[in-house]
Structure formats: C-alpha cells, structure tokens
Image (cartoon, grey):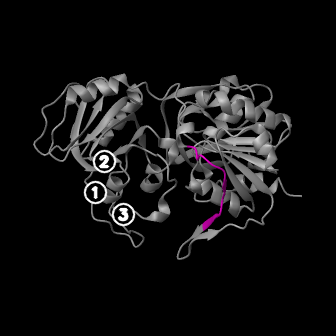
Amino acid sequence: MALSASTPAQPSNATGCLVLADGTVIWGRGFGASGDAVGEVCFNTSMTGYQEVMTDPSYAAQIVTFTFPHIGNVGANAEDVESAVEGAVGCVVREDVTEPSNFRSLERFQEWMERNNKIGLSGVDTRALTRRIRLSGAPNAVIAHSPDGKFDIPALVKRAQEWAGLEGMDLAIRVSREHQENWEGGYWRLGHGYGRASRDATPHVVAIDYGSKDNIFRNLVRAGAKVTVVPAKTTYDEIMALKPDGVFLSNGPGDPAATGEYAVPVIQKLLEADMPLFGICLGHQMLALAAGAKTIKMHQGHRGANHPVQRVGESWGETTGLVEITSMNHGFAVDAETLPDSLEQTHVSLFDGSNCGIAVKGKRAFGVQYHPEASPGPQDSFYLFEKFVGGLQG
C-alpha cells in the first residue's frame, strides 16, 4: 500500500498501520502480536537472518523495514534467536508471510512474532518507505495491529510525536543481563546444534554486556577463550577481581554518549591498566569515546548483511586495501574527524567513508563497527576473534 503525506482513507482489508510522527499513515495487514509499539523506523537490506535481526538487542526501540520482500518464508526456530531480552519492537514487510519451506523451521514466523510480543505489518511499499528514510532520515513512529481494523489514529500520531527518540537515550542498561554468567555455549554446526564451552579453556575473557548477541560469545569460545559475561554497569574493580586476560566490549542499542556516562570511566581505567580490549559496534564506540573521540547520530544508519568495509592504515601490511563483506546494525557512528592522535583508523565503509574500525596506539585495544559474528562473508571477519584471543595467550 502506498505512502501518503496525509491520512488516507483506511482500506477495507487493513488490520495494521505505521503512523509516523509527521502524521503520515501507512496502512497494511497486521500479523504477530496485537497492540501498538513506538520506535524509530529503520531499514535492513539483509536477504536472510530475519529472526537474528528481530532478536538482536541492538534493535531495541526500533521498527525494522526489510527491503528483501520475502520475510518469514523459512519459518522460525529456537537456534536462530540471538538473545532472550528485548530486540526490535516490530517489522514492516512487502509480501504477506507465506507458509515456511525450510527443514529447520519449527514454527510459523507469524506465530513466533505473536509469542514474542512483536508486531508485524505486511503489504507495504517498502521501497518507498526505504527511499523516504534515505532522503529524510529515520522517523519516529508507532506500529499497530488490530485484527478488527479499529485504530485511534490521532492518539497514535500523538504517541509518535511525544516519543523522545534514540538520541540521548541509554538503552544498554535496559537490555543488559542483570547478573554475572559463566558462558557455556559453543559454536553451531549443521546437524549437531550448539556445542558446549569448556570452563577449563584459557585465556579468560570478561565480556561486558551492553546488549550482546549470543553468537559473539560463541565465536570467542571458538577462538579458544573461556568467557564470563558481566552486566553493563560492572565496575573496574569487579572486572579485575575476575582476573581476566582480556576484556570484550559488546554491541548494544541506544546513544553511545548516554551509555558512556558509566561505561567510559571503566574502559579508561582498563586502558590505563594495559588490559587488552576488543569492542564490537556499541563496544567499538565506547572504546573510541574512552580514548577521546566523539560519536554522531547518522542520517539513516547502516543495517544489512552486505556492507563492504576496507582495511586502511599502515598496520595491515600486504592486506592493506582488502575489502570485507560485513554485517552492520548501527544508527550512531564514531566521528572520524574527532579521532585523537592516540587512535588509528583501521577500517572504513565503502558506502559513505564512515569509520568502521579503530586501534589504540601502543595498546592491545581495538574495535570494529560491524558484526563479525554474523558471518556474512561468511568468514571474512572471524580473524578479529582470533586476533584478540590469540593475542592473550602465552
């Protein structure tokens, strides 16, 4: 159904809608949970992995528009869930969700969405919506589903307008685990599922959870580490009491400057102690802030499993200029113009030249903006886990 600059007449078969803060109403057919939810509308260009996207805590308070038209056609299963905490509040898709056709499917996507309290909207011109986001930026909106087709549009517009938005919002504290956890999950193999991690492994990595994806921890285990996961507000002394060989800074949602209020002082102490550090996405941004750089809100963000990133700088040797196909999910970025002399830029996006990697000079501390654990290349970026864990041994 087409976009409109005003409130169009509701089609007879419309059981769902997306209401933007400027009053635009986009009608469609609702699926999944009933009710309404507020968030920032973004778009994701991945062709696969929709369940991973919907359960990624980095998508908290966001409504995902999938540019690939066939979402839900491989069903849903328990193995593709990335976290038990909050992820995306809903999704917008072009085609109606069809019956699943995949040997790993255990449940229809519609049923999985309903059971996980996520709202879906189908029948939308997702190309037009994506173009709008690209031209005008990511809008605040309310996604709603009512099986009887009844909506209070003025109330939904008001809710979208009154929502503060992601800028200035600390969401990491909302999606971080509450207690320390000894991570026990291993890497997934077809026909075998997930393995088990050995608690006897060395080195020992303490992972700070700002809204992490489980597959990050599995990749740390695959690279040879024992992993202990701690909440976002764990103090420096509490981390050091665990006697880590290295500290991992996880991905997560929200404004990095807001999360940095409590995260940055801890990371600065870790840097002063020469603790090896590795950050992904929000963790990458936290490391940059701790080193004196700044972050900015992006116009449309980067979200998808097909983003080319190039290695830059003098430290790569003969692999300088190599391009990795990466998975991304971020609406904020490290401002490359603010990098202090203590930081080296190691990766850049070939889409817009934005910063995608840093290393702290003279330290074993680095971060990347993208998600190597999502394996889009499929293994272009696993070397980052090997680099981090391998550097802790001996």
Which stretch appears magenta?
Answer: 176-187
Q: Nearer the viewer, residue 337 or 274?
A: 274
In the picture, the quarter occupied by the C terminus is: bottom right
Q: Position of residue 107 (x, y in %)?
A: 35, 65
Amino acid type for the residue under numbered disc 3: Gly
Q: Residue at x 30, y 23 (%)?
A: 22
Q: Residue flagged by tag 1: what amino acid is it?
A: Val
- Circles 3 and 2 in contact, beta carbons < 8 Å: no
Q: Which residue is mark 1?
A: 97
Residue 142's x, y, as percent?
Answer: 32, 34
Q: Amino acid at mark 2?
A: Gly
In the figure, residue 97 lies in which quadrant?
Answer: bottom left
Instruction: Report, in whole angstroms, how far the alpha carbon at label 3 lies from the one at label 1.
Output: 9 Å
Residues at marks 3 and 2, CA–CA distance in whole angstroms:
14 Å
Let me know if residue 195 appears in the view: yes
* Residue to which mark 2 is pinned: 120
Instruction: Inspect the magenta stretch and tell me whether residue 104 lies in it.
Output: no
Q: Is residue 316 or residue 188 the one in the foreground?
A: 188
Q: Residue at x 80, y 38 (%)?
A: 270
Which quarter of the figure is the N terminus placed in?
A: top left
Looking at the picture, tell me which residue is in the foreground, 318 or 348: 348
Task: Pick whichever of labels 3 and 2 is earlier in the sequence.
Answer: 3
Residue 155 disc label = none
Badge 3 crowding class, 10 Å Cα cut-off, few under 14, some 14 to 19, many 20 or more, is many
Location of mark 3 (residue)? 75
Are circles 2 and 1 on residues that touch, CB within 8 Å?
Answer: yes
